[in-house]
Image (cartoon, rainbow, N blue to C red):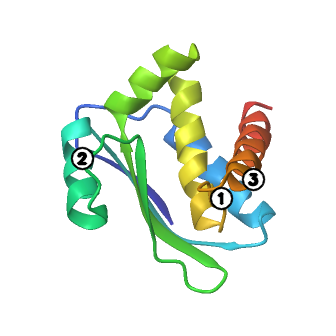
Amino acid sequence: MIDFFSETEFEFSDEDSVKDWVAKTIVSEGLKEGDLTFIFCDDVYLHKINLEFLNHDTLTDIITFDYTLGKEIHGEIYISIDRVKENASEYKVSFNEELHRVIIHGVLHLCGYKDKSEADESQMRFKENFYLQAFQS
């Protein structure tokens, strides 16, 4: 089950289509959908989580907690709407495009993709672009 919650005034407008897209992405990666929760929040909320759980004193756009069991995807994905807005402006893309990129980035982490090394980051970007294109089709 895929759920969306907001800890800020943000209202997610394309919930059903994103649920379908995320579910299809998980299946196409050879995995099974479990319980997946997206929490939209602001910088203050996510910074607190970053400090408390990861000991990182920085702003970030996303934090993913992976509770996957075998091939069944479970997790919590926290997304800062403040960061998404700023990144969309910086990268000159629409807010929705950046939000979808961040959403699929978190899902790909749950599917086992990493982004710490240059090679891993390159593969992550390739997969993000692949699934973003699939969503827009």
What residue is at 22 percent from the left and 56 percent from the top? 51
To which residue does mark 2 refer?
47
Observer-nearest residue: 117 or 123?
A: 117
Observer-side mark, 2 or 1, equals 2
Sooner in the amino-acid sequence: mark 1 or mark 3: 1
The amino acid type found where label 2 is placed reads His
Mark 3 secondary-structure assignment: helix
C-alpha gap between disc 1 and disc 3: 26 Å
What residue is at 53 percent from the left and 41 percent from the top? 102
To which residue does mark 1 refer?
23
What residue is at 37 percent from the left and 42 percent from the top? 60
**The C terminus: image quadrant:** top right
The amino acid type found where label 1 is placed reads Ala
What residue is at 63 percent from the left and 57 percent from the top? 108
Residue 74 vs 88, above or below: the answer is below
To which residue does mark 3 refer?
119
C-alpha gap between disc 2 and disc 1: 28 Å
Sooner in the amino-acid sequence: mark 3 or mark 2: 2
Q: Is residue 28 left or right of residue 63?
A: right
Number of other residues with Cα within 10 Å of mark 2, as a class: few under 14, some 14 to 19, many 20 or more? many
